Amino acid sequence: MRKKLKIGITCYPTVGGSGVVATELGKMLAEMGHEIHFISSSLPFRLNRMYHNIYYHQVEVNQYSVFQYPPYDIALASKMAEVIQRENLDLLHVHYAIPHAVCAILAKQMSGRDIKIVTTLHGTDITVLGYDLTLIDAIRFGIEKSDVVTAVSNSLIEQTHELIHPEKDIIPVYNFIDERVYRRMEASSLREEFGIKPEEKVIIHVSNFRHVKRVPDVIKAFARIQERIDSKLLLIGDGPEMTVALQLVDKLKLKGKVLFLGKQDNLEELYSISDLMLLLSEKESFGLVALEAMACGVPCIGTNVGGIPEVILDGETGFICELGDITEISEKALVILTNHDLQRRMADSCISMVNERFRAEHIVKQYERLYFDIFSKG
Ligand code: GMT
């Protein structure tokens, strides 16, 4: 029988793809019998009830008047070291090279134990912070000193090599979703609640409304789509670009056609009433929301950016368009929305693609194999 591992997981616990993936991974590893210890500054938002084999250790970050900034990194490393010793952890799986991999390396030294470190790169740590010359050495250090480094797409691996030049091999492990949650379901009452008429098509966009998500492009593309076909746009999420989005909707006279629904749980219900997802980002190492939508049978239009073309297969599960090309995006959207057979075919391909390439069980086993490989190499 295989050894059950004691695994510490650290991620940013607030809403965001990396936090979601880290939490779902922990939940599934716990279901497989491993003992999981989340070490983070607040309870990961998907850890919303008691789970067998899962423990949570809160990092307290105090604000002292002598410090200009609260010492999160040091507090996290100290908590990691404490948990490594007290719980006798076998390995730490951290999400983000900085600060989390660097904290794990410090914690390993503080604890004096030969704990193994697995680091997963999600994108922002490389594609945004990697352009900050003052951080490159720290990112490279976090990568080089980890036992295993994974990244969520091949594109992210390429970018990491271009920007950071690590010597270490980086292993691609795609993101996954829990197919038991993300599946097409009967949610027609939601359409009525939102005042969506039976003949109207529904387009959805889900993000944290950061500039890189290009929410204005989503609205501009929708403006063209709704001139040709009865439709509504659901905007899910909140963030720094919200005011810009509200103003643009006003300017383009789309009030009543664009529904701002804010942050939402139970996204599977919203995907289940949608006909098309738009993900038009200028940086995106993977695009977890596209995977969630696809699992619910929603074709996607994404930009030719980062890992998006690895998730949305052009012509099969949606279309890939050039960044900012509103004409191409709206025309491709209309191709899907006006051709019932194509929409149906793409919806079916989406569901089978998620099953073949991004199946939770396979991806979680991939991580588990990587963990065991470290120990078998000694
Ligand atoms: O995209 C964000 O703003 C959040 C960020 C995060 O750290 O949660 O998402 C990154 O990780 C996700 C999970 O691996 C990926 O699906 C997103 O594509 C990636 N975001 C970027 O690369 C901008």
Image (cartoon, rainbow, N blue to C red):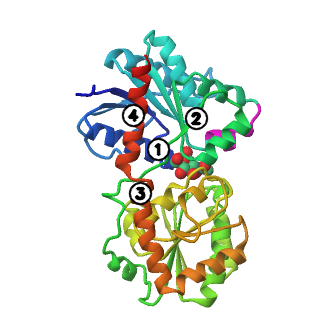
- Secondary structure under the numbered disc 4 in the rendered image: helix
Q: Amino acid at mark 1?
A: Gly
- Secondary structure under the numbered disc 3 in the rendered image: helix
In primary-sequence order, the first of circles 2 and 3 is: 2
Q: Which of the two marks, 1 or 3, is nearer to us in this view? A: 3
Q: Is residue 286 magenta?
A: no
Residue extending farthest to the top is: 112
**Principal SS element in the magenta part?**
helix
Instruction: Return the mark for residue 356.
Output: 3
Instruction: Return the mark for residue 170.
Output: 2
Q: Which of the two marks, 1 or 2, is nearer to us in this view? A: 2
Q: Are marks 1 and 2 in contact (CB under 8 Å)?
A: no
Q: CA distance from mark 4 to mark 2?
A: 15 Å
How many neighbours does mark 4 have within 10 angstroms: few (below 14), some (14-19), or many (20 or more)? few
Q: Is residue 95 above or below residue 186?
A: above
Q: Which residue is mark 4?
A: 369
Q: Residue 334: where, in percent of width, then height?
A: 59, 83
Q: Residue 34: where, in percent of width, then height?
A: 29, 32
Q: CA distance from mark 3 to mark 4?
A: 19 Å
Q: Which residue is mark 1?
A: 19
Q: Residue at x 45, y 55 (%)?
A: 357
Q: Which of the two marks, 1 or 4, is nearer to us in this view? A: 4
Q: CA distance from mark 1 to mark 2?
A: 20 Å
